[in-house]
């Protein structure tokens, strides 16, 4: 996946150099359009998220882009587990230290490769952007079962996962509430680079209905601790798909 994402990112970036030299003709029906605002749903192999994008026309088919993503990021070794020790257990990811989310801000350009001359046609666009990324690391809390002294009953205690302490999986009932440990979230700063192609099939020139397919790279100065007992990374590459809707004016 990492090699594929890097290859696609390089190909898309090479296309951008050609787009910068392309013509500046504008479809007459879109000559009055100067701004766009859209939002969308993001899927990538290790998580989900949302996207918000604002663009403004600079000249002809070239647009300036301000792009934001908030996506979850799972470790490739994550596996969901249900304990066999309880009749109705919850689920958890054994060894997971932190629930991780990337907040990306991207500044860049978009080129319109083709315009919608008629209804029921598709407009193609190419975009490249780069900027800062923040990784939010929310510690994982688990519901741990403790028996009473007479072993006739027991109770659950919410505890922050500790790989040195919580080695007995038979007493792990499942994950605690998502909000448990929210105040202990840590933040790591990094950089991101994105490139994508977009296909817009909306029926009207003032609307956006598009699918975006691209590659993203996130780089941090040190490893992001998502899992225990596994190698964590400081460079993340991913392919993604985003469905967007919005308006143009």
Image: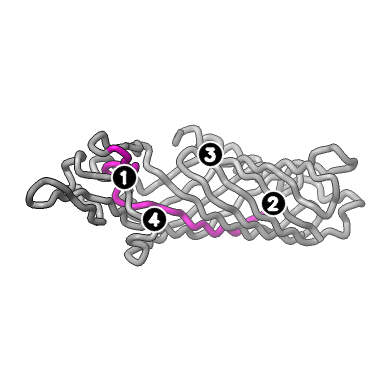
Chain-order first, disc 3 or disc 2: 2
Chain-order first, disc 1 or disc 2: 2
Please give the residue where the numbered disc 2 appears in the rendered image: 110
- Which residue appears farthest toward the left when viewing the image? 150
Left or right position of 43 against 174: right
Foreground: disc 1 or disc 2: 1
Left or right position of 90 against 157: right
**Residue span colored magenta:** 87-110
Residue at 60 percent of width and 59 percent of height: 107
Please give the residue where the numbered disc 1 appears in the rendered image: 232
Q: Main secondary structure of the magenta part?
A: strand
Please tell me whether mark 4 sits on a helix, a strand or a loop.
loop
Chain-order first, disc 2 or disc 4: 2
Residue 50 painted magenta: no
Please give the residue where the numbered disc 4 appears in the rendered image: 178
Please tell me whether mark 2 sits on a helix, a strand or a loop.
strand
Residue at 43 percent of width and 47 percent of height: 73
Label 3 crowd bin: few (<14), some (14–19), many (20+), radius 10 Å: many
Left or right position of 5 against 117: left
Please give the residue where the numbered disc 3 appears in the rendered image: 239
In the displayed structure, 155 sits above or below 113; it is: below
Residue at 26 percent of width and 43 percent of height: 95
Residue at 29 percent of width and 50 percent of height: 97
């Amino acid at each position: 996946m990492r090699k594929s994402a890097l290859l696609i990112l390089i190909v898309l970036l090479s296309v951008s150099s050609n787009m910068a030299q392309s013509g500046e003709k504008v479809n007459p029906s879109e000559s009055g359009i100067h701004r766009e605002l859209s939002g969308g749903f993001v899927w990538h192999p290790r998580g989900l998220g949302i996207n918000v994008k604002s663009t403004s026309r600079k000249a002809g088919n070239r647009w300036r882009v301000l792009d934001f993503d908030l996506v979850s990021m799972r470790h490739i070794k994550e596996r969901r587990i249900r304990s066999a020790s309880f009749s109705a257990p919850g689920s958890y990811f054994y060894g997971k230290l932190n629930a991780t989310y990337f907040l990306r801000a991207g500044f860049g350009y978009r080129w319109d490769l083709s315009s919608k001359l008629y209804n029921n046609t598709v407009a193609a666009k190419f975009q490249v952007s780069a900027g800062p990324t923040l990784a939010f690391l929310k510690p994982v809390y688990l519901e741990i079962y403790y028996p009473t002294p007479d072993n006739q009953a027991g109770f659950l205690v919410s505890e922050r996962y500790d790989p040195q302490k919580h080695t007995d999986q038979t007493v792990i009932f499942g994950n605690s509430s998502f909000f448990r440990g929210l105040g202990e979230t840590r933040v790591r700063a990094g950089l991101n680079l994105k490139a994508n192609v977009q296909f817009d099939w909306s029926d009207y020139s003032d609307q956006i209905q598009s699918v975006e397919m691209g590659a993203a790279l996130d780089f941090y100065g040190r490893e992001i601790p998502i899992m225990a007992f596994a190698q964590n990374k400081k460079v993340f590459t991913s392919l993604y798909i985003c469905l967007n809707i919005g308006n143009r004016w």
